Image (cartoon, rainbow, N blue to C red):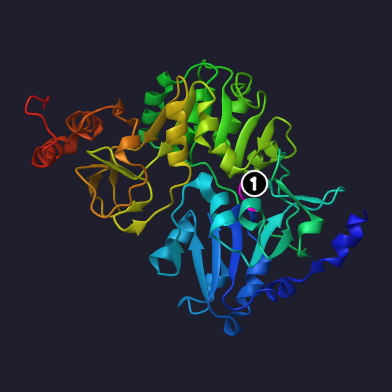
């Protein structure tokens, strides 16, 4: 087959790609690392002739021209599966909406319930076999765009090529149009210096990890801190099976801790769904035979996770109430992020022989007004519950770790108050008494 000729026949401009969209269409943007900025700008250029165009995406780093050009959402409506800081600002201004989901079900949603008219997504240049690689979005891109009526690839030569088993690539024969000229750098996320609380939480979790453990690390200060602490520990032969690969895993690899040798599945290979981080991380992932990208439907499958002994899952949240309910998506009614794979890994890691699922949160926070507030609260008042109390296992703060598995309401209250900031413990005890979840014989 002459794939070069087919490629040339499908070359188009961003304006020609945007012309594929009609009023009323659903348009898929996929992930922020693979954001097709040229097509987005061209679509925004058609604002006045289009109405009721709905756009879906997730973890967009911005700016989205279709949102910036239409603050009243009269022409474009943006919907996010998982919100970045940029998308959160859009939601604060009423310019975007959130779509709840369980991450492992993303392919199922698109297969059974959703329709995509036009998809715009960045991919690597075509290889000699006619394939484009979805790179940092390999675990979700094809599931999100593969059934679209029209698929437009915007070529980004700076994307790393990440090997996979299936769904990480798409063939030129399945593509409607190819757009060249993308010059934006691949979005990177710099590691933030961990807070003292992050470091303390990581040290509290460390004793629960053993040689040969397979890890899932979420995004944030505590997972980054744990990655650095593990790199300096005596642990060895750790494995990676994570929905999101960040620089914490690169730190482990550089320290010789990440070998993947003891994994029950894909031994010798680190498994990821998505990746975001530094340029150094992307260079490490590029054509690395020691890493494999697999669909989120597989990576986040609790049965797959459970098949690996000593699986340790580390995720964060916004707050926990005294019943053990976990809110990771909102502060009150203000939307913050998304469910992601938290429920997937809570379920799978708890099923793993020797496995442990941690939810990590600093016991308190200081707001912009300078006031300290507790992140362990008596009960929720409008917060979105990400993980139900029945699936709350290990909760970790800088003050310790507690397992809520099998615990009654009064036991949970006692354990969680023990993890709270000392300034708030008396008030939490009083609230627990009022909520009838405090034993009179409880320690004070």
* Residue sitting farthest toward the left: 440
Residue 277: image quadrant is: top right
Give the image location of residue 70, x and y in percent: 51, 77
Asked whether residue 4 appears in the rendered view, the answer is: yes
Instruction: Tell me residue 289's x, y (percent).
Output: 74, 32
Viewer-side residue, 13 vs 404: 404
Camera-nearest residue between 204 and 1: 1
**Seen in the image, is 287 located left or right of residue 196?**
right
Q: Badge 1: how crowded within 10 Å, few (<14), some, or many (20+)?
A: many
Residue identified by numbered label 1: 136
Question: Could you tell me residue 6's position as x and y percent?
Answer: 87, 61
Residue drawn at x 33%, y 38% is 362
> Residue at 45% of width from left, 69% of height from top?
95
406 left or right of 360 in image: left
Is residue 222 positioned above or below 1 on the image? above
Q: Is 44 covered by the magenta stretch?
A: no
Q: Which of the 4 image quarters holds residue 91?
A: bottom left
Q: Mark 1 falls on what kind of element?
A: helix
Q: Which residues are magenta?
A: 137-141
Q: Main secondary structure of the magenta part?
A: loop
**Is residue 139 within the magenta segment?**
yes
Q: Quadrant of residue 32?
A: bottom right
């Amino acid at each position: 087959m002459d794939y070069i000729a087919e490629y040339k026949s499908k070359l188009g401009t961003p304006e020609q790609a945007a012309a594929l969209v009609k009023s009323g269409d659903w348009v898929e943007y996929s992930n922020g690392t693979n954001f097709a900025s040229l097509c987005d700008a061209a679509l925004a250029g058609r604002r006045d002739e289009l109405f009721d165009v709905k756009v879906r995406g997730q973890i967009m780093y911005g700016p989205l021209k279709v949102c910036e050009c239409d603050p009243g959402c009269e022409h474009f409506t943006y919907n996010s599966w998982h919100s970045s800081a940029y998308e959160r600002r859009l939601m604060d201004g009423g310019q975007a909406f959130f779509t709840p989901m369980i991450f492992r079900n993303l392919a199922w949603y698109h297969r059974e319930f959703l329709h995509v008219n036009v998809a715009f997504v960045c991919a690597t240049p075509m290889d000699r076999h006619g394939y484009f690689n979805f790179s940092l979005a390999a675990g979700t891109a094809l599931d999100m765009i593969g059934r679209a009526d029209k698929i437009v690839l915007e070529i980004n030569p700076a994307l790393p090529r990440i090997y996979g088993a299936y769904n990480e690539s798409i063939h030129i024969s399945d593509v409607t149009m190819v757009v060249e000229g993308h010059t934006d750098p691949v979005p990177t996320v710099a590691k933030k210096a961990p807070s003292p609380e992050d470091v303390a939480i990581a040290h509290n979790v460390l004793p629960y990890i053993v040689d040969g453990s397979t890890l899932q690390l979420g995004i944030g200060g505590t997972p980054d801190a744990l990655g650095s602490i593990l790199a300096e520990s005596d642990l060895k032969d750790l494995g990676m099976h994570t929905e999101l690969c960040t620089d914490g895993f690169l730190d482990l690899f550089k320290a010789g801790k990440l070998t993947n040798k003891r994994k029950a599945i894909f031994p010798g290979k680190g498994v990821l769904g998505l990746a975001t981080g530094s340029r150094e991380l992307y260079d490490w992932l590029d054509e690395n035979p020691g890493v494999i990208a697999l669909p989120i439907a597989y990576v986040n499958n609790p049965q797959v996770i459970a098949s690996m002994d000593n699986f340790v899952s580390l995720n964060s949240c916004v707050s926990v109430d005294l019943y053990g309910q976990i809110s990771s998506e909102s502060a009150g009614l203000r939307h913050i992020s998304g469910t992601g794979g938290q429920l997937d890994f809570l379920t799978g890691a708890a099923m793993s022989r020797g496995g442990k699922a941690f939810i990590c949160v600093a016991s308190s926070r200081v707001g912009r007004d300078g006031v300290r507030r507790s992140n362990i609260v008596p009960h929720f008042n409008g917060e979105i519950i990400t993980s139900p109390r029945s699936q709350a296992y290990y909760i970790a703060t800088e003050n310790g770790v507690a397992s809520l598995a099998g615990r009654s309401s009064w036991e949970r209250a006692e354990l969680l108050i023990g993890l709270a900031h000392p300034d708030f413990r008396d008030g939490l005890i009083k609230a627990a008494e009022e909520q009838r979840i405090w034993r009179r014989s409880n320690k004070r």
